[in-house]
Image (tube, helix red, strand yellow):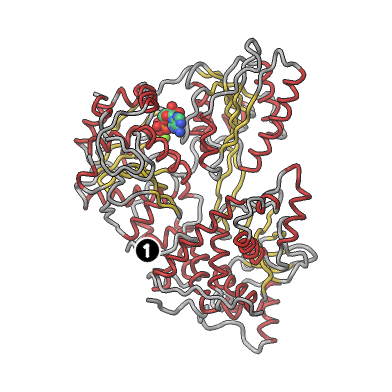
Amino acid sequence: SSQPLLGFIPRKVKGEQVRKALPHTAQYRKILEARKKLPVFAQMDEFLAMFSHNQIIVMVGETGSGKTTQIPQFVAFSDLPHTKGKLVACTQPWRDIAISMAKRVAEEMDVDLGCEVGYSVRFEDMTEPGKTFLQYMADDTLLREAMNDPNLTRYSTIILDEAHERTLATDILMALLKDLAKRRADLKIIIMSATLDALKFQKYFGLSKKSTAPLLKVPGRTYPIEVFYTQEPEPDYFEAVIKTVLMIHRAEDPGDILVFLTGEEEIEDACKKIKLEADDMVNQNPDSVGPLVCIPLYPSLPPQQQQRIFDPAPSTVSPSGPPGRKVVVSTNIAETSLTIDGIVYVVDPGFSKQQVYNPRIGVMFILVTPISKASAQQRAGRAGRTRPGKCFRLYTEKDFIRELEEQTYPEILRCNLSITVLELLKLGIKDLIRFDFVDAPSAETLMRALALLNDLAAIDDEGNITALGRTMAEFPLDPQLSKMLIASPELKCSNEILTITAMLSVSNIWVRPANAQREADEAKALLLVPGSDHLTLINVFNQYLQHKYDKNWAWQNYVSGRALAQAENVRDQLQRTMERLGIDVVSLSGRKELYQNVRKALVIGFFMQVAHKDGKTGYCTVKDGQSVALHPSCCLISQPEWVLFNEFILTTRPYIRTNTDIRGEWLLELASHYYDLSSFPDSGTKRALQRIAKRNGKPGGISRGGAPASRKQRK
Ligand code: ADP
Ligand code: MG
């Protein structure tokens, strides 16, 4: 029954308007042969029958069984969305995975990417209206779309993929789709998950309290995996990883290695170290040790480089020499979202980076945290795709049993909900406490989100969304950023705030290679604007624009050309949204108040993220009184009294990063409701603010006037 798929889509030749069936390429046939061997292919008829008889189905299958690449094609084939002018959507928790899946499927279907098959992610839309009928997308992109079209009329089928990841957006989408299914009988919904505990989703989507949604199970096809633990806890997991990889390379049979580490920097570092040591080993024993390639994999990697994980292992140097080996060093995106065939060894130090939100102090930080048992099992499973494999856990068996949680907590239970709450309010959902979440966040987290939105004047004291709040929800940004952007024309610096917002929305722009840290720091010093990391970002961006056609500029200045190009793109899109909403892009360019106004605009958005100098080098965050230090990357050398920060991070100690020197009186002036001293906790910060208020002859913010632009209604 896989025959119909063969002739499903007429092949299109680039630039040719005539759409006729053309013979498929050899590449297509080769991929098709491989596809037919995927476990989901064996259950195509069963899937199609279940799909046509039910509105909502839940599907589980081992990673690599073909869910993400095949099921959307089966759906498109059965549903024929293009004949109804509709689309099939398939969501992914990571934007770059959505892109690479769309690429892969376009290739599998022998069509151009962006035509029949496309993708849509935040700040990037690669689809053709009227032509695209299969769209991969980031889950938060679909969620935003739901805000403007709650019925999601464009879609005939929506597939929520990687539901087990339980990202915030997927969780909210599940709730919205459950409700939408009642209103749109023609809409089909598929929930896909890689872990076997799908019962939760089945129950959630059951038609009544007692019934459950139907389940399609694709049996996995894994070979046995031997799991090894360390005898003693490893004092340094990074060093242990390097040692283990080299040990495998020296002593184990051929087969590729997958290593799990926590983030970009660590991964790049590990790749360099492994490569260096392995080359050494090869030079010393060319007859017994084969060549090794190390490939990094993390979400912010350019898609072409991501594709490298599918390259075959390096071949032997001489015909009779020892075989080569491929090592992929990845974040947990290789846990379930991407399948790399040929992995035989997995090295698992047992950590991942997780967002943790503390509603009590209102800060979110990213922490390297022990993974759950479920994650550890997924990771081990990656070793048995092609033949029996081995998994090396760099922790003790006792720790595995006693210390690891059963499941990873869903994101909704550990993140800042303010933007989501704003989105839900905009959708008209008011009673958030009783909203039908898959797992409801704590009342405290919800209250905290509401309080932040109230502080920003996005909702009023009764919890109703304000005109400002509606405008803020138009931007795919944290509420602090959108507030600052909307307020900035009043201070005649929206041009600059737009740049800052774009720069803060992309991944780190600074490049600091381990072997050239001094050079990188010197280069950075030349770009610094004293007193403000935010103003420094503006400077870097402007310099980048001036040197755009100089290919070496970014490289020579130790900044990421790719991140800057992304920032430019993000800036264009935000600018278009501003134009659509009638928010002017203006600048006092050249005037000396400009930089001061930019810093004031920052205060309008981030007045709750301010630290006051406390002692010689330390700082203390306002209200919650958390002790923090300026991050070493920060450009504030003079240790000003008041510092506004963008991020609170916890590494060896609590740091604040991306900071700007501000004035205490601006807090009283621009955020008087928040800095109402009569309700302020007693502290050095309060006394400092009282002195300022006294000096200025004001009692210190009794009115709730707020920021100059915040209450203004816009068309
Ligand atoms: P699942 O979603 O069930 O985990 P996928 O549909 O992602 O499975 O993958 C099915 C198969 O397609 C896997 O064997 C995977 O290695 C292969 N595959 C996916 N993307 C690519 C790609 N870009 N290049 C080569 N093979 C790929
Ligand atoms: Mg998948």
Looking at the rendered image, the quarter that the N terminus falls into is top left
For residue 539, what is the image quadrant?
A: bottom right
Q: Residue 168: percent from the left, percent from the top?
A: 44, 50
Mark 1 surroundings within 10 Å by alpha-carbon count, few (fewer than 14), some (14 through 19), many (20 or more): many
- From the viewer's perspective, is residue 251 above or below residue 240? above
Viewer-nearest residue: 177 or 622: 177
Q: Amino acid at mark 1?
A: Leu
Q: Quadrant of ligand 2?
A: top left
For residue 387, say whether it is visible.
yes
Task: Work out which residue is located at the far right of the displayed protein and give it.
Answer: 616
- From the viewer's perspective, is residue 341 above or below residue 699? above
Q: Residue 481: percent from the left, percent from the top?
A: 52, 65
For residue 611, what is the image quadrant?
A: bottom right
State the residue position of label 1: 425
Task: Work out which residue is located at the far bottom of the displayed protein and give it.
Answer: 697
Q: Residue 422: percent from the left, percent from the top?
A: 41, 63
Q: Residue 31: percent from the left, percent from the top?
A: 39, 26
Viewer-nearest residue: 80 or 42: 80
